[in-house]
Amino acid sequence: MNSCTEINDRLIESTIEIFTGMVMMDISVAGEPMNKLGPLKKSITGMVGLAGTHKGVLAVHFPKQVALAVTSNFLGMEVEEINEDVQDAIGEIANMLGGNLKTILSDRGKDIQLSLPSTIFGDEYAFSSQAEVDQVILPFQAPAGLFYVEVELER
Amino acid sequence: MGLENYLSNATMEVFASMIFIDITPESPSGEPMPEIEPNLSSLIGLAGDLKGILAIHCPSAVALGVTAAMLGMEVTELDEDVKDAIGEIANMVAGGLKESLAAEDKKIELAIPTTVIGKSIRTSGLSGATRAMVTFSSPLGRFGVELRFILS
């Protein structure tokens, strides 16, 4: 397995690529990788599971105003509430990030499969997986605010 | 393929063998069932011939009671133990579903369980996915097992 730092670096690179190329939004790294995130308030999380030689979860956490800006840019339409379009857009971003993570973890991603993306939203929630995982949270700055890309992989 | 049956059987088996709480699947009979308002949802991704996400949705009372029964100790808060217990149930129910699908020559692999704890949390899949939902009644209250999927 690649070293954690290399995975982080390549994941940062592909997150920026997806946002520049697909969402048409300039984002930048907003600090060092983190190990823990407090409760998420008025947010939406997109997640996708990884199964196969690496088992885990990729999640991307957006505060509501960032999720709305991302969806508006991504779909080229104004959205004002967390509706089905926002859920689909955020799920699709998790799916694209998961696809890239697959290739980062395994040569051409051939031994890893992705689950269906899913979204979670609410006024306040905590997101966590089981104890026995390696976890990293990468913070990013978008024009509308901060968002986080989280990866949890079974040891 | 009776996915609701698979979900229902897998859940009953986990409860009968590990938790020892009587649960009964609620049969949808015309009347729409009241929604489950979860305080805790454990989700696990499924990949392979069926791509999906399986979720266990529990109100606090059910999550606490099930964890207490499973671990044989008192639990009063939605803490690490509860997260691990319900996450493990999601894992085992998904394992049961995997076995049922294998009997139909459909191969799936499991990701790892993730748990969300909070107030008025909602989960959803992609808009193109199919949804299968089974709700159960138990002495602790109602809870739901949900599968959103596409066949690939």
Image (cartoon, rainbow, N blue to C red):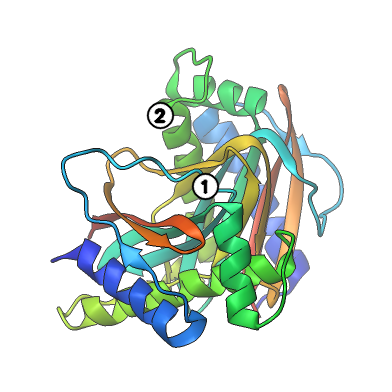
Q: Position of residue B6 (x, y in %)?
A: 24, 71
* Quarter of image, res A66: top right
From the viewer's perspective, is residue A134 above or below residue B42? Answer: below
Tag count in the figure?
A: 2
Q: Position of residue B95 (x, y in %)?
A: 38, 79
SS for tag 2? helix
Residue tagged 2: A84
Crowding at mark 1 (Cα within 10 Å: few <14, some 14-19, many 20+): many
The answer to whether B31 appears left or right of A76 in the picture is left
Q: Is residue B103 visible?
A: yes
Number of the front mark, 2 or 1: 2
Q: Position of residue B8 (x, y in %)?
A: 29, 68
Q: Who is closer to the viewer here, B19 or A46? A: B19
User: Farthest residue in the right direction?
Assistant: A32
* Quarter of image, res B113: bottom right
User: Farthest residue in the bottom direction?
Assistant: B17
